[in-house]
Amino acid sequence: MKNIKLKEKIGYGLGDAASSMFWKLFTMYLLFFYTDVVGLSAAVVGTMFLVTRIWDTFLDPFIGVLCDRTKTRWGKFRPYLLWVAIPFGVCGFLTFSSFGSHETSKIVYAYVTYTLMMMIYSLINVPYASLLGVMSSDPQVRTELSSYRMSFAFGGSILVLALVEPLTNLFSQMKLVNGGPSMLFGWQMSAGVFAIIAIFMFLLTFSWTKERVVPIVEKKNSLKSDIRDLCMNRPWWILLGASVMVLIFNSIRDGAAIFFFKYNVTGADSFCFTILGGTFTLITVYLVLGQAFNIVGILCVPFLTRRLGKKNTFGGAMACATILSVVFYFLATDMIAEILIMQVLISFCAGIVSPLMWSMYADIADYSEWKTGRRATGLIFSSSSMSQKLGWTIGGSMTGWLLFYFGFEANVPQTESSLQGIMLMMSLLPACATFISMLFILKYPLTEKKMNEIVKSLMQKREGV
């Protein structure tokens, strides 16, 4: 199963490019969109993120169970890429819209559209993530596939971050409200462009990938037994904790970045340039640099894991991210070059961890089958999506609440408390999350030696040895 062609690797990567375009829009811009464009308070948005994402987080395992029990001529997981691609794009477009002029109508619309978007996101992303576990049974090939996935994911993020401001400014000029450009229309149309691209990418993933790994014994498992097996899976609990902390790190830091450059950084307004009619600001440079060096980190993963193993590579990256995030706190707000350098280094570390999480979940699916004799790939991978959503839920809600706690008010000069709070959200608070993640991963038991034994045993059982 090692001979997976380049086309299939690219096809698999395109699926996460599609998801990540909207994931990055949500993590970097949705709070800003709701507060500075729609006009909702940060506290209201933080609470909305908690309520909607908690529901969606615990929906993921049920989608995983549904995928495990799906049987079609295309397999268990690929069909969802075909069925859900268009609803995904439509919901993405609706999320970056608003309804009515009163705050209540805006809040209700935000709750409904965002909840629907998160449900559709799960319905396509859980089977997409699970697909990794059945494309190959070789752990190193899975790491390579995961690296392709995350490289394309950050490529999709770069595409969004590079184009969202120019597109928004361009579309905003096409509709005037009270004599000025409509930022709401600009965001809506920009989201529509990304939605069309995402649909096309998902359909290519469906077309170019193949499911190969089948269970040792095709039999129906009860939901109760699947959940019991998962709850008894110690590596799953450890990776779940580590993954949640990684997502909290990313969510708080990403969510605070646009506020940091708008309100904290001295000279950010004077740093801008125009290409092809689009205006690029310092925040755009900062975000694109981050995504670019996420990719550099991803590309180093196969090399690092062959020499250090997945566990040591994960732990080392989190240790470095912790130290660098602490250093970030001591940077002055006019040290633009140093801020960008720290973004490069921290993003490199974060990029290393991204593909490892998904590859390690695939290993855990093998471990579960080896331990219990039953394979629940969808349930295992839905738990990875659940950890992603849970970390994002906690981190995203904390971002809104922390801004409110520190006294943030949109579109006005900030108090000293607010500016200090935003700096903490860019440095020491994310550092706490990466440190805890490192402590979790130190307890992870599935070393390369152990996984080689498990894979060999499963292959012998499949071959009837």
Image (tube, helix red, strand yellow):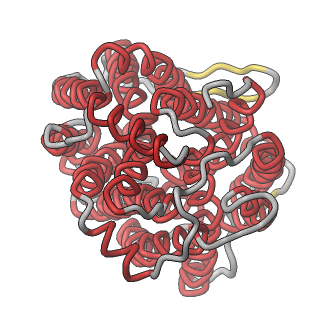
In the displayed structure, would residue 99 be above or below residue 433?
below
Answer with the quarter of the image where residue 403 lies.
Answer: bottom left
Direction from residue 74 to residue 58 in the image, left or right: left
* Residue at the (79%, 58%) spot, across then down: 74
Q: Is residue 315 above or below residue 210?
A: above
Residue plotted at (38% across, 68% down): 46
Q: Nearer the viewer, residue 291 or 219?
A: 219
How many labels sit on residues? Answer: 0
Q: Nearer the viewer, residue 63 or 137?
A: 137
Question: Residue 146: x percent and y percent?
Answer: 53, 34
Residue 167 % position (x, y): 76, 40
Quarter the N terminus occupies: top right
Horizontal relation, residue 129 to residue 375: left or right: right
The outermost residue toward the front is 465
Judge by depth and name the residue closer to the eye, 183 or 299: 299
Residue 328 visible, this angle? no
State which quadrant residue 93 falls in.
bottom right
Residue 462 appears in the picture as rendered: yes
Q: Would you identify the image quadrant in which residue 316 lies?
A: top left
Q: Is residue 446 left or right of residue 253?
A: left
Tell me the residue at 41%/36% (across/down).
456
Q: Residue at x 42, y 74 (%)?
A: 58
Pick the front one: 95 or 280:
95
Q: Position of residue 275 (x, y in %)?
A: 75, 20
Q: Residue 419 at x, y = what percent? A: 26, 44
Question: Is 265 placed above or below 177 here?
Answer: above
